[in-house]
Image: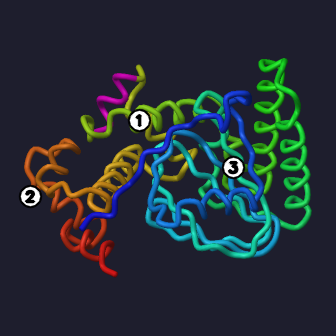
Amino acid sequence: MSVEVTPVRYQSHDDEYRLDVEILDSDELRARVAKHPHRGFERVDFQCFLFVRSGSYTHSIDFQTHHCTAGSCLLIGPGQVHRFGPTSDWDGWILIIGPHYVPEMVDSLPTHVRTDTVLSETISELFQRLTADAALPAEQRRLLSELLALQTEVLVRRLALGHAGAATQSHIDPVMLERFREYRRAVDQEFRHWHQVAPYALHLACSTKSLNRACRAASDVSAKRVIVERIVLEAKRLLAHSTDTAAKISADLGFDEPTNFTKFFRRETNLTPAAFRAAFQSP
């Protein structure tokens, strides 16, 4: 039996609001989740920031369980599969951003950012400001949307200050960093069809060596590894959350033979596709 995923698209919570940025405090989030007690895995097309100001909370994102404590911020991006954790006594907010308002620097942050006490207090103040501004009358909708988008940009940069990896990226040649980001976006779009680096280099009008240099500088992995990790992630999603056979998944991911997909998956995960599916779906 597969563990189904519900696709969730961004929409404003009422007809009057109609903004591309929404913020809920932990009480309202718990109330919404409680309305659907059997709410399972979801795949969103928007960006979320879930910040824990105090207490503890557990959340699942793409096969990883994140144990959040005070100062934790989870980033749930478009296309990721996540699941809300059990009800717990935590205080904080979730910020929901429509697809057109996601700051580029989000790509440089990990899924789980842990902040220290000082930065946590600063981010709490940002969420409080966002909450207050999101409640302003929306007569000047464009101006209010721009204000919330700018505050979201500030939030992302504050989180980057608390994450060593993002700080390291700030010292990378901007041209190299932009090439890495373009490559990541291209891989997200074409990984089912292009398993080698060369087609991406042609598409981005650069050399394979240039892509490798950009990937090494930005993430300390090769350009080929970026492709491999993306294919593995999608294979896991399909095995865990669909009833598709391994042969169909193999074809969907661009493998010419199911046996090649099985060899690839076992090499990368030490499990066969069938074993992974059985392990994920076991009670």
Question: Disc 3 marks which amino acid?
Answer: Ala
Mark 1 element type: helix
Does the CB distance between marks 1 and 3 fall below 8 Å? no
User: Residue at 85% across / 53% down in the picture?
Assistant: 123
Q: Earlier in the sequence, mark 2 or mark 3?
A: 3
Residue 261 in magenta stretch = no
Marks 2 and 1, how far apart at CA: 31 Å
Which percent across, then down, holds residue 85?
57, 69
Q: Which residue is mark 3?
A: 166
Q: Which residue is mark 2?
A: 259
Given the image, on which type of amino acid does mark 1 rest?
Lys
Quadrant in which the N terminus appears: bottom left
Query: Are the residues at dot 2 and dot 3 in contact (C-beta closer than 8 Å)?
Result: no
In the rendered view, does 199 fall on the left or right side of 63?
Answer: left
Depth check: give the residue in front, 182 or 74.
74
Q: Amino acid at mark 2?
A: Thr
**Residue 104 can be seen in this image:** no
